[in-house]
Image: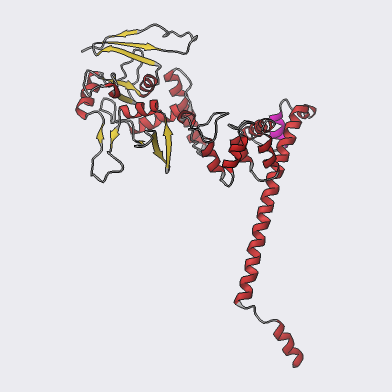
Amino acid sequence: MTSDSNITSEWQPLSDEEAAAIREKDWKELHWQLRSLAQQRVALEAKETSLLLEAEESRLYRRLGYSTMTEYMERELHWGTHAANERLRVARELLALPLIADTFERGELCFSAVRELTRVATSENEHEFLAKAQGRTVRDVERMVAGLRRGDSPEDDPDPKLIKKKIVLEVCAEVWARYRRTRTEREKAYGQRLDDSEFLDGLLRDAEAPAAGQMTKPAVQVAVTVCKSCKKNFTAAGGQQVPIDDLTADWLTCDAELIGDLESNELTRPKSHIPDAIRRKVMHRDGFACIVPGCTATRNLDVHHFEHRQHGGKHTVENCGTLCGGHHKQHHFGRLKIMGSSDDRTFTWHTDEGVMSATTGTPWEFVEED
């Protein structure tokens, strides 16, 4: 009995304090193991990146019958084309960025963060970017370098024109085929290849547009705000305030809806920048079509102030005209100059210096009919 009693006493359940101590040790050990594996994984990525560059320089791929290093990486290392090219680009950039390369090799900076830093850092300022990237997530690093050019300091103001946002869609084969067909048809109609922003902007404006022959609403349905202290322009989307340059802000707010002061509690109704009565008259006069000679657009229409509002232009029928979204943007960005009065309007294209074009230096004389 004594022996049985002793055996039984050895298997007494753990107290709450003892169980908690074991659980505490378990999660700390688990965390340490995961962190250790993550560091090893990143160090392996750094080692692979270095070896890829060596393989490219030695033309190892040719000995195996491949025509390019990218093809070798796809077939032998199971990388996609874009990922393979990005790995090679980063490997080349790291040759001139020893501090970032060393941090990468130690497993302290993951490949995704390294990829973003190599787009902008130089040997002169890589220490600044490393210091600012310390403790940040990959998403934070992406935002940190967005809008910067190579050689810029991490403290420099970003160029809004360089900020891009990525949209990833996964669709069935039928929808993909319709997308390709629609994109091809639109590019034929425009007579040029459209980038992703231009194509998607046209689709969205079509979705928001009324039936042909009806007055359109202002195109801008996103929030464009101006900071009272720094006077910089921002647009709000996805919970973020994205900076935009002055030209883009002028273009977007030329024909927009105003909702009032965002810091005021005053109850204000949204109202068109241009009075609806003026919009209606202008669009009827212009036949619900873009008035730029040669343009056949009858959708994606804006009403534009020929004399800009910041220069004293008024909301009048004489000072307003109908432009398609593409020509409206070209005008605000300085490519298309519009001069003259409502009954004698001149349109002049400005191309880059030294570039010949059918419209270069040849103003289009265009008289609007009553």
Q: Residue at x 24, y 14 (%)?
A: 342
Question: Horizontal placement of 338 versus 314: left or right?
Answer: right
User: Is residue 142 on the magenta stretch?
Assistant: no
| Residue 368 percent coordinates (x, y) | 25, 12
| Residue 256 percent coordinates (x, y) | 30, 31
Is 354 placed above or below 316 here?
Answer: above
Which colour scheme appears in the figure? secondary structure
Q: Residue at x 70, y 31 (%)?
A: 95
The N terminus - image quarter: bottom right
Near-viewer residue (124 or 162):
124
The answer to whether residue 47 is visible is yes
The answer to whether residue 65 is visible is no
Q: Residue furthest top?
A: 362
| Residue 278 percent coordinates (x, y) | 21, 25
Near-viewer residue (155 or 148):
155
The C terminus - image quarter: top left
Number of numbered labels in the structure image: 0
Q: Residue furthest bottom?
A: 1
The quadrant where residue 321 appears: top left
Is 201 placed above or below 350 here?
Answer: below
Question: Over which residues does the magenta segment extend?
Answer: 69-76
Q: Residue at x 66, y 34 (%)?
A: 87
The quadrant where residue 275 appears: top left
Question: Horizontal placement of 269 versus 327: left or right?
Answer: left
Is 195 placed above or below 83 here?
Answer: above
| Residue 156 percent coordinates (x, y) | 50, 33
Question: Horizontal placement of 304 versus 169: left or right?
Answer: left
